[in-house]
Amino acid sequence: MILFQIVGIIAIALLLVIIALFILYALLRKDIRSLMAEGEMPVLLPIPIPTKNRTFIMRVLVWLFDIRKWQLVQNWHFELENDVEIVLPKDFTFDGASIPRIFWFLLSPVGLLLIPGLIHDYGYRFDQLWQKNANGEIEPYMKEAGRKAWDDLFKAVGIQVNGFAGIDFVAWLGLRLGGCFAWCKHRQRNESPLPPQLNSAR
């Protein structure tokens, strides 16, 4: 009985804290400005989650464990803090930051970590990025840099974009601990990336 009372008190206290934080957010929201301009964000197409025309059990399993994928509608340019302009090609598909579903109520895979997740997914998949050099030509960037370099870039881009170093550090730590599975899967596939076509929409 006492245990239920303690759990109830903790739940009510957490609810009151969340309500207080929401009220504070609502009062201060008008002063919030994004660190990225709207035009700098990638244009993404959501890819349907494949539940239709499946058996009931498969629909449930896909709903529980499949993650929505997103596709770049056009080439996406992003300037890193070292003034390198990277370009991710149109049609690249990714699934956002690899956040365990149980934590999605705190941190969405395509929320604060959307931009670092997009860059990191491309780096993990191909072990390189593309950059636009001073002559306007596309060339490889960080080719064969290795897993740690991509994890470190994820953290650096996260801090650059969202300014939330604590969350970026926790996400980086998760990558260092569990990213080896995705990294090894991509190294087995050993895909070769195609450079972005600069005549495609920016």
Image (cartoon, grey):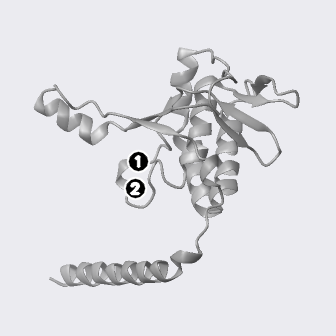
Residue on which disc 1 sits: 100
Q: Classify residue 129 by image quadrant.
A: top right
Q: Residue at the left extreme?
A: 56
Q: In which quarter of the image is the N terminus?
A: bottom left
Q: Relative to 182, does residue 84 appear above or below in the rendering?
A: below
Q: Residues within 10 Å of mark 1 (few under 14, many from 20)?
A: few
Residue type, numbered disc 1: Pro
Residue at left 54%, top 23%?
186
Q: In this view, does 1 lie to the left or right of 158?
A: left
Q: Is residue 94 left or right of residue 142?
A: left
Q: Position of residue 142 (x, y in %)?
A: 76, 30
Residue type, numbered disc 2: Phe
Residue at left 62%, top 59%?
162
Q: Position of residue 143 (x, y in %)?
A: 75, 24
Q: Where is residue 133 in the image (x, y as percent from the top left)?
A: 84, 30
What kind of element bears circle 1?
Answer: loop
Q: Nearer the viewer, residue 13 or 90?
A: 90
